[in-house]
Image (spheres, rainbow, N blue to C red):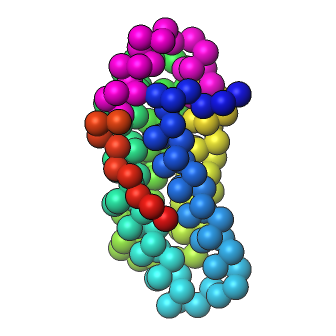
Amino acid sequence: MLRDRSLIPLSRQHQHGLALCVMTERALREDASARNIAKLSGKAIDHYDLELTNHFEMEEQIVFPAISAHPLVPDLLAQHRRLEAMIAALRAEPSSEQLLEFVALLRSHIRLEENELFQDIQTTLPRETLDSIGKQIDGKVVRICL
């Protein structure tokens, strides 16, 4: 199913997150040196600071309140907090284990939102609600060109 226009900015951010996951795993396979781990951790931290904080904010302030009874919301919120904690750990002491754990959770989190939550949202919410959510997202989204 195509993504509803109201959710496209969030889906684009998801694409960026998935790209970070793939690039990080590939780069670690090629070079697991401390220097490369620090570099890749810096990229994950930058991505978090530039885009993920904005993404989590939009979901938590715009999307989740519109679907507060959805059974995935508590788990997704808990995953946001875990991802934040993982970034804090990477800031303090980067390691390949922490980096791989971060990208694994980020990937599964994105897949859950795309394949289940967003599908449910766009098939159950009324058009007016979707349009309202889309307008709010459009006003807050940070757009990054990779």
Question: Where on the picture, by quarter, is residue 101?
Answer: bottom right
Residue 142, compared with residue 72, is above or below; it is below
- Can residue 125 be seen from the camera position used here? yes
Q: Position of residue 132 (x, y in %)?
A: 36, 19
Q: Nearer the viewer, residue 11 or 73?
A: 11
Q: Is residue 68 left or right of residue 29?
A: left
The residue located at (51%, 29%) in the rendering is: 5
Principal secondary structure, stretch drawn in magenta: helix
What residue is shown at x 53% (from left), y 56% (from top)? 16
| Up/down of 29 relative to 45, above or below | below
Can I make out residue 85 in this image?
A: no
Which range is magenta? 118-137
Question: In the rendered picture of this protein, how many numbered marks are placed on residues?
Answer: 0
Query: What is the quadrant of the N terminus in the image?
Result: top right
Instruction: Let me know if residue 132 is in the magenta part.
Output: yes
In this view, the residue farthest toward the left is 139
Whole-percent x and y of residue 43?
Answer: 45, 72
